[in-house]
Amino acid sequence: MVSPDSGMSDRADRIDRRLLAAMLRHPLASQSGLADAVGVSRNTVRARLERYWRGRGLRGLDRAVDPAFLGFPLRAFVFTTVEQRRLASVSTALADIPEVLEVNGISGDVDLIVDVVARDADDLYRVAGAILGIPGVERTSTALVMRPLVPYRVKQLLD
Amino acid sequence: MVSPDSGMSDRADRIDRRLLAAMLRHPLASQSGLADAVGVSRNTVRARLERYWRGRGLRGLDRAVDPAFLGFPLRAFVFTTVEQRRLASVSTALADIPEVLEVNGISGDVDLIVDVVARDADDLYRVAGAILGIPGVERTSTALVMRPLVPYRVKQLLD
DNA sequence: CCGATGACTGATCATTTTGCTCATTTCGCT
DNA sequence: AGCGAAATGAGCAAAATGATCAGTCATCGG
């Protein structure tokens, strides 16, 4: 594990932060443009971009896609309690539901937080029902996202 | 509001779906390459990309950035109950905490779900404490993300 | 039915960018 | 100080871009 501030480490160094910030500001910028903006050589940008999109720094474009644009304007969290022995099969079953975007195991009162989307309220009811119907799922509680209060942002972690 | 399947509407049409799928698969692909992959003209790709990054379809690159890469490997949800009269000032205060990535108002037992990151357990304790210390915040409950069970994916909504 | 409109198409051209290689320099670690 | 990895800048052919233009197609409203 190399030092966090040297070259291409597992953690972002100064160049990474400046480069990512420039990318956030100008998603359509060319590599040459980013090199100018950051003040590094073109080859450096190229090497870093390749590394980012290989999964070291950037997690793919999935999260950038707005589900509402795809016809899924409703978002909800389904807090889920499961039989521990069946955690694996529950996970697999959750992954088989297209409206399930992400599932995380969490500490606390419930076991899973399931991030889902839906076309409308009826659809959400159906999705929540599908989750509750998975063998091994003991209990669920659905929290509809009513309103974004602080939109997702990461820029403040780059500064 | 034009028909969902014609030209550049508020909802993704067939070209959008195919184009987004190609972008997910090849984030570094050129516009020309995407045009070839999707089977549309280069100008069409160009027009669509510009529209996406203007916010119609893609939500910016923020979510693609891996907070762990920036030195924040821990993720947690802070379920928060607030005084309703002070929702606005609480939101503003939450936005002032750098480790707060996103805040959504939700239905159900608690008012807000606050998506936070932290450097380590001590840091998470500090962040949670900062949230609890906001005037207007009545109660919080922190759920640490222990393990991703289904990684975020959106491809299944494009098919 | 007809005209207007917006989106898609393909062609074109000058400019910019990319992909790649190479030698050198710089940087950080031991 | 020595070493390895990363950054740099130069160079070049190929690819891509940005922009424009005229034509086509589908949709919509009168």
Image (tube, coloured by chain):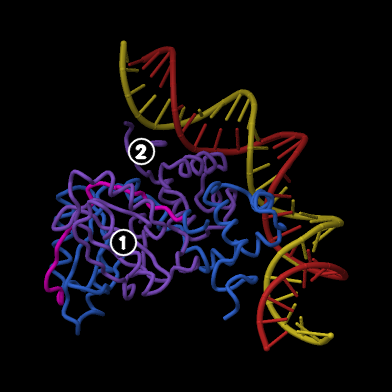
Chain colours: A blue, B purple, C red, D yellow
Marks 1, 2 in one chain? no
Question: In the rendered structure, which amino acid carries the disc numbered 2?
Answer: Asp
Query: Which quarter of the picture shows residue B42?
Result: top right
Q: Is residue A81 magenta?
A: no
Q: Position of residue B14 (x, y in %)?
A: 39, 46
- Residue at x 33%, y 56% (from the top left corner): B157
Foreground disc of the pair 1, 2: 1
Question: In the rendered structure, which amino acid carries the disc numbered 1?
Answer: Leu
Q: Chain of mark 2?
A: B
- Residue at x 16%, y 64% (from the top left corner): A130
Most common SS among magenta residues: strand
In this rendering, the count of numbered labels is 2
Q: Position of residue B44 (x, y in %)?
A: 52, 40
Given residues C16 and B100, the one toward you in this image is B100
Q: Which residue is mark 2?
A: B10
- For residue A2, side relative to residue A60 (left or right): right
Q: Chain of mark 1?
A: A
Given residues A52 and C20, the one toward you in this image is A52
Residues at badges 1 and 2 in contact (C-beta under 8 Å)? no
Q: Which residue is mark 1?
A: A101
Query: Which quarter of the picture shows residue A140?
Result: bottom left
Q: Which range is magenta?
A: A135-154
Image: C21 above or below A76: below
